Image (tube, rainbow, N blue to C red):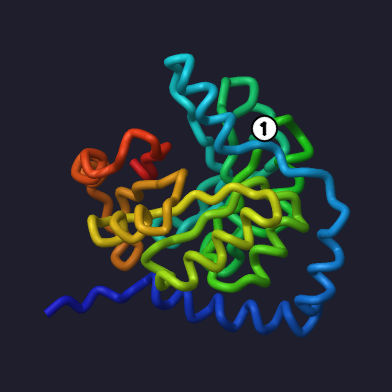
């Protein structure tokens, strides 16, 4: 019997509460109005593809203050300084953790990082509701993360379609062959293979190699964690 707690389940339960709390402060209709006249997002997927087409590695550099498995990772933590250092080092794009309760992130970190450089930015969070997609657009995200393990097919389709409608790219994250099959069914262009099991937080680097052979050559693949 496995007594390991399902960390993803715990995070998602909190996300449901969080969306309700935020909706009480700003309604969905208010968010929809606020994103209407924003500048266009920076191209995220196209930037990765252009760098890879030149035979260069396209690194998505992560800005993360803490994690459930490692605790506090960086203190002091200045997202703008980190973003500039990543850009100078040749990163293709940024990934900023905005989850508060488990990763000590916030939306301000994404805005500060994006304002400090010209790189496109991924909002890395546990997105389960259209409210969060509009919120991502409002804070300046150029791409959002959708996690197959957290969403059924209908939700994946709905949230990915909304992101596309708002001009953002989507990184669809998978961890096993069943999740990969679902990602391919909804025609995801940008697929992330997470070597970490989000239910146990165990990492196995071979996960990427196991799944890579099953992905058509016309998809862009990101390997995550490790």
Q: Residue at x 39, y 44 (%)?
A: 224
Q: Position of residue 6 (x, y in %)?
A: 32, 74
Q: Position of residue 120 (x, y in %)?
A: 65, 37
Q: Quadrant of the C terminus?
A: top left
Q: Residue at x 16, y 76 (%)?
A: 2
Q: Residue at x 58, y 60 (%)?
A: 161
Up/down of 169 relative to 157, above or below = above
Residue under label 1: 119
Q: Residue at x 59, y 83 (%)?
A: 17
Position of 106 compared to 219: left or right?
Answer: right
Residue closer to the observer: 175 or 46: 46
Position of 12 compared to 210: left or right?
Answer: right
Position of 94 compared to 196: left or right?
Answer: right
Callout 1 secondary element: loop
Mark 1 burial class by Cα count in 10 Å: few <14, some 14-19, many 20+: many
Question: Residue lying furthest left in this view?
Answer: 1
Up/down of 219 relative to 168, above or below = above
Q: Position of residue 131 (x, y in %)?
A: 67, 72
Up/down of 202 relative to 211, above or below = below
Up/down of 185 relative to 31, above or below = above
């Amino acid at each position: 019997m496995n007594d390991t707690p399902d960390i993803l389940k715990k995070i998602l339960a909190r996300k449901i509460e969080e969306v309700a709390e935020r909706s009480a402060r700003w309604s969905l209709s208010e968010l929809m109005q606020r994103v209407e006249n924003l500048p266009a997002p920076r191209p995220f997927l196209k930037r990765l593809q252009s760098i890879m087409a030149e035979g260069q590695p396209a690194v998505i550099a992560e800005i993360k203050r803490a994690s459930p498995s490692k605790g506090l990772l960086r203190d002091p933590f200045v997202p703008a300084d980190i973003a500039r250092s990543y850009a100078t080092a040749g990163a293709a794009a940024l990934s900023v953790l905005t989850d508060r309760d488990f990763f000590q992130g916030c939306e301000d970190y994404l805005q500060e990082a994006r304002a400090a450089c010209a790189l496109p930015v991924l909002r890395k969070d546990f997105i389960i509701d259209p409210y969060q997609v509009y919120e991502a657009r409002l804070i300046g995200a150029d791409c959002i993360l959708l996690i197959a393990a957290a969403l059924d097919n209908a939700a994946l389709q709905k949230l990915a379609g909304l992101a596309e409608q708002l001009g953002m790219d989507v990184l669809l994250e998978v961890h096993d062959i069943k999740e990969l099959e679902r990602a391919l069914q909804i025609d995801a262009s940008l697929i992330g293979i997470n070597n970490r099991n989000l239910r146990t937080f165990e990492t196995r680097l071979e996960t990427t190699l196991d799944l890579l052979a099953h992905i058509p050559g016309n998809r862009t693949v990101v390997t995550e964690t490790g």
